[in-house]
Image (cartoon, rainbow, N blue to C red):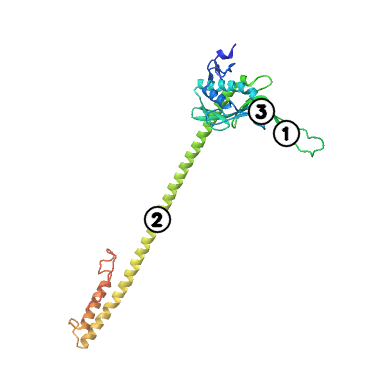
């Protein structure tokens, strides 16, 4: 049965291949626009002097490395890959480097397209100092290698053309795995943000508790200070009152009217007022818990 006329479904994830998808044509007629752009980019290029491959990359062409002899075959394979990807609703994208990319959903899967080279040691000329040198020759073996994933290449029994649907399945699995990994990262980031917010809230609660305890401690210290100050004032007032009575008697004995207009009378009046004001109960203690002393006013 012709694989180009059959619909194939991947039993693992339900990936459905439409008829003719990922089947390589025998020519490049009506090829994909990116294949046309890549052909134009390769025109006039000369093989690299080291690996003898044509190197193509940029913002308008696919990134690949292939020998002139395998260029047509590689372009036909990539034409089948790009068209097959679009039949599945995927979108080919350029990566501006050696890789090519296909966006599956919201995930961009990149892969490399290249021809493997064969490394051969070059024999040294007679009489020369032994020095290892190598020659890189194109092998004709084409590769499609998913970044950080599987690689597909020409085999002894099956060529790369027969592995394109397996390559598409690997792209799909890689995209799903990447999407799952991204969701896990986002979930970890979300949980980290929640934990950080909880820690921030806990720090704010601890700071509010500390400030409240500090306020209460300060308020307690102020109350103690008011209490002890009131006690000192009360004791002083209690000691001043009998003393002022004696002072008044001495003024009378000296012939000075304590209620007159003399300086001594003014002083005695101020002292009595000071003693009364110094008494915290005169100011309404403990209801007001304030004490005031009247200034000296002759």
The answer to whether residue 13 shows anywhere in this view is no
Q: Is residue 101 above or below residue 265?
A: above
| Quadrant occupied by the N terminus | top right
Q: Residues within 10 Å of mark 1 (few under 14, many from 20)?
A: few
Q: Is residue 222 above or below residue 136?
A: below
Q: Nearer the viewer, residue 293 or 185?
A: 185
Rendered image: mark on residue 116: 3
Q: Residues within 10 Å of mark 2 (few under 14, many from 20)?
A: few
Which element type, helix, strand or loop, lies under badge 2? helix
Query: Sequence-wise, which precedes: disc 2 or disc 3?
Result: 3
Q: Locate residue 225 relative to residue 100 in the image: left or right.
A: left
| Quadrant occupied by the C terminus | bottom left
Look at discs 1 and 3 and give the one toward the viewer: 1
Circle 2 is placed at which residue position? Answer: 211
Rendered image: mark on residue 48: none
Going 40% across and 55% down the picture, which residue do you hit? 211
Going 39% across and 60% down the picture, which residue do you hit? 217
Q: Alpha carbon of mark 2 to alpha carbon of mark 3: how far?
A: 71 Å
Look at discs 2 and 1 and give the one toward the viewer: 1
Q: Locate residue 207 relative to residue 171 in the image: left or right.
A: left
Circle 1 is placed at which residue position? Answer: 134
Query: Sequence-wise, which precedes: disc 1 or disc 3?
Result: 3
Which element type, helix, strand or loop, lies under badge 1? strand
Residue 187 position within the rendered picture, expressed as x and y whole percent measured from the top left: 49, 36
Q: Alpha carbon of mark 2 to alpha carbon of mark 1: how far?
A: 76 Å
């Amino acid at each position: 049965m012709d694989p180009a006329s059959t619909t194939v479904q991947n039993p693992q994830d339900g990936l459905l291949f439409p008829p003719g998808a990922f089947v390589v044509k025998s020519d490049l007629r009506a090829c994909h626009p990116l294949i046309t752009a890549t052909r134009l980019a390769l025109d006039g290029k000369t093989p690299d002097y080291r690996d003898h491959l044509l190197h193509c990359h940029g913002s308008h062409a696919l990134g690949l490395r292939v020998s002139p002899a395998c260029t047509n075959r590689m372009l036909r394979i990539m034409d089948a890959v790009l068209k097959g990807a679009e039949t599945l609703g995927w979108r080919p994208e350029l990566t501006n480097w050696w890789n090519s990319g296909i966006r599956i959903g919201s995930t961009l899967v990149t892969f490399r397209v290249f021809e493997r080279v064969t490394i051969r040691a070059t024999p040294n000329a007679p009489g020369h100092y032994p020095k290892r040198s190598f020659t890189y020759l194109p092998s004709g073996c084409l590769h499609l290698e998913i970044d950080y994933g599987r690689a597909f290449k020409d085999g002894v029994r099956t060529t790369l053309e027969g592995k394109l649907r397996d390559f598409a399945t690997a792209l799909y699995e890689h995209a799903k795995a990447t999407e799952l990994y991204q969701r896990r990262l986002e979930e970890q980031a979300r949980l980290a943000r929640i934990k950080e917010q909880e820690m921030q809230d806990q720090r704010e609660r601890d700071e509010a508790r500390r400030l409240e305890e500090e306020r209460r401690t300060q308020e307690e210290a102020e109350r103690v200070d008011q209490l002890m100050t009131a006690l000192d004032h009360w004791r002083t007032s209690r000691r001043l009152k009998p003393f002022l009575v004696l002072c008044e008697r001495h003024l009378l004995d000296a012939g000075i009217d304590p209620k007159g207009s003399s300086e001594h009378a003014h002083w005695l009046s101020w002292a009595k007022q000071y003693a009364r004001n110094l008494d915290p109960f005169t100011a309404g203690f403990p209801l007001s818990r304030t004490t005031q002393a009247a200034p000296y006013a002759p």
